[in-house]
């Protein structure tokens, strides 16, 4: 049995199991969709600030930087255990989700590893954290504010590119 809900920008068809098909979601609804996924998956995203992330990194947690390779090379968290696996990839048509993200993380990390996930400002890392928890990673925390918050707190950074390459 279906109930049809209409909105000028989208048409949703809901069944009794709360599944739906979507035709042209408006941009604001991406947040609502993420919230729905969180509620349905049972995953609980733990968000920590840069100070707590720094403390965990100092005690051996892995920092998973989900920014693009280009962003990473311009500057990143200076940590012994750091991995850069982009959640989004640059394409001629803009950024798209990395279809191999979970596979790449699974090759670099164990599902029991303590992971701190960070990006530039905290948006991509939040989505990546949801995906990782849904895929069975157990100890994943999202760093609120991302690399920008890390820099504001004057924590150590490392720059991979020479200044003339930037």
Image: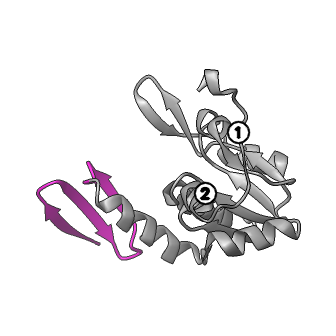
Residue 81: name its quadrant: bottom right
Residue at position x 60%, y 74% from top? 47
How does the figure colour the protein chain or chains? one colour
| 45 in magenta | no
Q: Residue at x 84, y 65 (%)?
A: 113
State which tag comes first along the sequence, 1 or 2.
2
The N terminus lies in quadrant: bottom left
Considering the numbered disc 1 on the image, is that residue within a helix, a strand or a loop? loop
Q: Quadrant of residue 151?
A: bottom right
Q: Main secondary structure of the magenta part?
A: strand
Q: Residue at x 78, y 73 (%)?
A: 55
C-alpha separation, residue under disc 1 versus residue under disc 2: 12 Å
Q: Which residues are magenta?
A: 1-26
**Label 2 near label 1: C-beta < 8 Å?**
no
Query: In this picture, is 123 found above or below 104?
Result: below
Q: Point out residue 23 in the picture as x, y percentages from the top left corner.
A: 26, 49
Task: Locate residue 57, reporting x and y percent.
Answer: 80, 65
Where is residue 76 drawn, in percent x and y? 68, 47
Q: Is residue 28 left or right of residue 4?
A: right
Q: Residue at x 54, y 56 (%)?
A: 148
């Amino acid at each position: 049995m279906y109930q049809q809900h209409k909105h000028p920008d989208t048409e949703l068809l809901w069944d009794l199991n709360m599944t739906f098909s979507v035709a042209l979601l408006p941009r604001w609804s991406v947040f609502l969709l993420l919230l729905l996924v969180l509620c349905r998956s049972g995953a609980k995203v733990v968000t920590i600030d840069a100070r707590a992330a720094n403390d965990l990194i100092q005690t051996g947690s892995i920092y998973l930087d989900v920014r693009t390779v280009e962003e990473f090379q311009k500057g990143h968290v200076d940590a012994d255990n750091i991995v850069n696996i982009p959640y989004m990839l640059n394409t001629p048509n803009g950024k798209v989700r990395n279809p191999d993200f979970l596979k790449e993380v699974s090759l670099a990390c164990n599902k029991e590893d303590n992971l701190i996930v960070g990006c530039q400002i905290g948006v991509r890392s939040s989505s990546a954290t949801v995906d990782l928890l849904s895929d069975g990673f157990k100890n994943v925390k999202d760093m609120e504010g991302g690399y920008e918050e890390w820099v504001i707190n004057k924590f150590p950074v490392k720059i991979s590119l020479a200044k003339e390459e930037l």
